[in-house]
Amino acid sequence: MTHPLFDKHQATLDRALQAIAERGYWSHFPESASPKVYGEGTAEAGKAGYEALLGKPFDLDQPGTVGQVGKERSPYGFDLGITYPKADLDALLAAVAEAQQGWRKAGPQAWVGVCLEALERINKASFGIANAVMHTTGQAFLMAFQAAGPHAQDRGLEAVAYAWDEMRRVPAGALWEKPQGKGDPIRMEKRFRIVPRGVGLVIGCCTFPTWNGYPGLFASLATGNAVVVKPHPGAILPLAMTVKIVRGALADAGFDPNVVTLVAHEAGDDTAQRLAMRPEVRLIDFTGSSANGAWLERNATHALVFTEKAGVNQIVIDSADDLAAVARNVAFSLSLYTGQMCTAPQNIYVPAGGVATKDGRASFEDVAKAIADGVAKLLGDPARAVEVLGAVQNDGVTRRIDAARKLGTIVLDSQAIAHPAFPQATIRTPLVVKLDAGERDKYLSEWFGPISFIIATKDTAESLAIARKAAKEHGALTLSLYSTDPKVQEAAIDAAEDAGVALSINLTGGVFVNQSAAFSDFHGTGANPAANAALTDAAYVAGRFRVVQHRRHV
């Protein structure tokens, strides 16, 4: 007998299963914020709902609450004033253990059905969550709506589809018959039960709390695990709203809502480490710095740890039919959300002797100027610029901009822009600095933010060699190539496969290297130091459950 929520959402699940098998374009949750899609008044209601949360305790009834925490400040220049339950970890995890018993016994169809229901409810809250993301991460509203709303929800659905695809491979039972010659065969009845691994811990990041958080949350929940969500102290609200919605879906389905809980904390304390080292925690999903990710990989050996860490994303320019189109595409990639994306390019390698174009050879200086001009033109209108750039999430970004200015010749300086609606917002345009290939100590580390380097190399072969080595040793989530030469394209493919990094070739249209589409693009590979897993593939979900059997003679 199937679960009612599984039946309710089975058509969606079936279409998601088709999508992960085909890897073509499909999106279940519409990315358009139009009232024609989400309904008249939905945007206004979502914003009003978000504003109603400001300046007061967040309503989340969890066991083990021993006070309130929360000091979020909007990158647009004001304090949110929201506090969240502070958890006594012993009491909270005891309640989680109790809740987990009924959830574990419910089985895969119930797990998946509740996840699908929760995702549909989250989608209905997209406008409220978008406002929360905007004012915790600094993303401009439209990006916050799309990336933190429908795109993140699609990533969650993708994880659920992979989880179900792996679990359905295990039959519920079998009749085992072993022939015994002339005698009666030995008959055994065998039953196979999928059991969760334990408690999952999702450690959120401050720039993409939902997009990076939903895959781990729903991969663990869909495989029967209870989940503790620990947001970044600077971006608690989007995940708090998510947890509340999921708890509501659990309760309405007859389950203890403590299957999913929130642990909020102040910046600078050791809550993440203490949670990660709890023996109850058997799964950890982390997005953040290399230092913290490496600490988890080294120390949380009792758990299965999935990390996305820092990397150095790169562009190799060899040749181009239309240099202006290349410059426009690269300029947008450098500017989008002020370079505060784990996929944003940093190093741009150009041969010192220039590149071939349809209009003749363009010098290194021509290429650098084209990119700088592309950024300047894109961001020339401040009202439009702020909708591309968003706001700087934290002071570390501005400090890095100041430090990077001293590294080499400035091709394009970073400028402050006033936001017409939020005068206290911190808005910065990209900084572009010229370096030589030999200055590897300057550019072979992540400069997170709107910072990029145009690096003069001996030739494209050296560019690819540096890119290959950098991805293998320092990690990278993206690599981009511009070349009209099929042999160079093949060389880049070989370098990317060897280094385990996703490659984009000749992007000049409406797709950018720092964008990743659910159900089609694998985000990360797990094959270089930037990430030890991919979002989302079978390996991301298969270890989150185990199969326990019992058998008896018939």
Image (cartoon, rainbow, N blue to C red):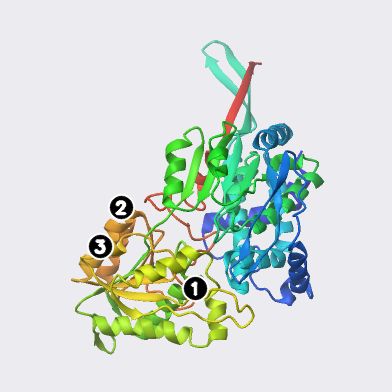
- How many residues crowd around disc 2 within 10 Å: few (fewer than 14), some, or many (20 or more)? some
Q: Is residue 31 above or below residue 98?
A: below
Residue with the mark numbered 2: 473
Residue with the mark numbered 1: 336
Callout 3, which amino acid? Arg
Residue 494 seen in render: no
Callout 2, which amino acid? Glu
- Residue plotted at (58% across, 14% down): 186
**Inter-mark Cα distance, 3 to 2:** 13 Å
Looking at the image, the residue that sits furthest to the bottom is 359
**Inter-mark Cα distance, 1 to 3:** 26 Å
Question: Who is closer to the viewer here, 49 or 503?
Answer: 49
* N-term-proximal mark, 1 vs 2: 1
Residue 313 position within the rendered picture, expressed as x and y whole percent measured from the top left: 38, 63
Residue 534 seen in render: yes
Rendering quarter of residue 449? bottom left
Q: Nearer the viewer, mark 3 or mark 2?
A: 3
Residue with the mark numbered 3: 440
Q: Is residue 527 above or below residue 33?
A: above
Image quarter (top left, top right, bottom left or bottom right) of the C terminus: top right
* N-term-proximal mark, 3 vs 2: 3
- Residue plotted at (77% across, 40% down): 255
On the rendered structure, is 169 left or right of 505? right
Under tag 1, what secondary structure?
Answer: helix
Residue 484 position within the rendered picture, expressed as x and y whole percent measured from the top left: 29, 76
Which numbered disc covers residue 19? none
Residue 347 position within the rendered picture, expressed as x and y whole percent measured from the top left: 33, 68
* N-term-proximal mark, 1 vs 3: 1
Residue 126 position within the rendered picture, expressed as x and y whole percent measured from the top left: 69, 65
Question: Who is closer to the viewer here, 434 or 512?
Answer: 434
**Inter-mark Cα distance, 1 to 2:** 26 Å
- How many residues crowd around disc 1 within 10 Å: few (fewer than 14), some, or many (20 or more)? many
